[in-house]
Image (tube, helix red, strand yellow):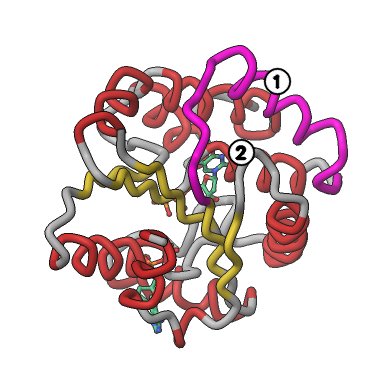
């Protein structure tokens, strides 16, 4: 039975970059590592509906915090068999975003904190009802929101994308989301957390040591 490790943080925090570094480090130590990122755009119909809604399709869907969160949750629910076998088959299954993304972004959009109704609603839906596997560790990768926004924008222009989705372009939302993430981590929401405050100083080898402890 392998370990489920989740990387969380704002868009542009460097989650994918850290996932790449960490998986390379773990593989170099002879471990088998599975990787996935949520939302699973191009893989799951719910994720595709999310992307379309964020681009202005499907009427007022993107305005509904709960409606969007249900789509994110269903994308994960449909990955359940794959997740379970991934955890069984690998030493480490590394996820870029998971249930806590729904909790943090939805609470931030609702102007709530981590101890508010939205986070509890996510827990009841995804943990109690859908039975999503509990992570062994959630890593919160924090960078100043301005740095995250600048990186996300640079990445999108490099990809020829049009300047961020509706969530990414709202800097006050990013600030609130960062705060909810920190509260989730400090309250050990659903699992132990590790907070990395200076993403530029992340050392994949040191992090791998701690994961394997
Ligand atoms: N530690 C870092 N220092 C400088 N740039 C970084 C760092 N980590 C990531 N980046 C750059 O920032 C951008 C966003 O990183 P990415 O890993 O895609 O973030 P996320 O997955 O959190 O949205 C990419 O262009 C990446 O090369
Ligand atoms: C996975 C997930 C993401 N989100 C949000 C966070 C991001 O702002 C947005 C898109 O995720 P993101 O990882 O940023 O994808 P991309 O940069 O490729 O568009 O969705 C949720 O609100 N709930 C979730 O469960």
Q: Relative to 45, say whether 32 is above or below.
A: below
Q: Relative to 200, say whether 38 is above or below.
A: above
Locate residue 170 relative to residue 168 in the image: left or right: right
Q: Are marks 1 and 2 in contact (CB under 8 Å)?
A: no
Dot 1: what SS? helix
Where does label 1 land, which residue?
Answer: 124
Where does label 2 land, which residue?
Answer: 102
Locate residue 150 relative to residue 208 in the image: left or right: right
User: 38 or 150, which lies in front?
Assistant: 38
Residue that lies at the very extreme toward the top in this rendered image = 129
Q: Residue sitting at 76 percent across and 49 percent down?
A: 108
Where is residue 126? Give x, y as percent: 59, 23
User: 186 or 13, which lies in front?
Assistant: 186
How many numbered marks are there? 2
Q: Quadrant of residue 125?
A: top right
Q: Residue sitting at 27 percent across and 70 percent down?
A: 21
User: 142 or 11, which lies in front?
Assistant: 142
Where is residue 170? Give x, y as percent: 67, 60
Q: Would you call the spot at circle 2 few (<14 residues within 10 Å), some (14-19), or many (20 or more)? A: many
Please state, as top left, top right, bottom left or bottom right, where the N terminus lies in the image. top left
Q: Residue sitting at 68 percent across and 47 percent down?
A: 104
Dot 2: what SS? helix
Q: Is residue 2 magenta?
A: no
Q: Mark 2 and ligand 2: say if the CB distance to the nearest ligand atom is below 8 Å.
A: yes
Looking at the image, is mark 1 or mark 2 earlier in the sequence? 2
Residue segment shown in magenta = 112-137
Where is residue 78? Give x, y as percent: 38, 18
Please state, as top left, top right, bottom left or bottom right, where the C terminus lies in the image. bottom left
């Amino acid at each position: 039975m392998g370990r489920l490790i989740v990387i969380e943080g704002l868009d542009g925090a460097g989650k994918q970059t850290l996932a790449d570094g960490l998986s390379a480090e773990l593989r170099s130590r002879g471990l088998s590592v599975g990787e996935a990122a949520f939302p699973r755009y191009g893989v799951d119909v719910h994720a595709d509906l999310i992307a379309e809604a964020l681009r202005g399709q499907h009427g007022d869907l993107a305005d509904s915090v709960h409606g969007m969160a249900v789509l994110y949750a269903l994308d994960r629910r449909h990955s359940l068999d794959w997740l379970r076998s991934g955890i069984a088959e690998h030493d480490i299954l590394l996820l870029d975003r998971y249930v806590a993304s729904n909790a943090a972004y939805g609470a931030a959009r609702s102007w709530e904190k981590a101890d508010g109704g939205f986070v509890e609603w996510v827990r009841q839906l995804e943990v109690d009802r859908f039975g999503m596997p509990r992570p062994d560790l959630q890593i919160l990768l924090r960078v100043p929101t301005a740095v995250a926004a600048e990186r996300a924008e640079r990445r999108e222009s490099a990809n020829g994308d049009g300047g961020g989705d509706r969530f990414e372009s709202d800097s006050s939302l990013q600030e609130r989301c960062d705060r909810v993430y920190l509260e989730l981590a400090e309250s050990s929401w659903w699992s132990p957390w590790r907070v990395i405050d200076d993403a530029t100083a992340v050392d994949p080898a040191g992090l791998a040591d701690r994961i394997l402890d």
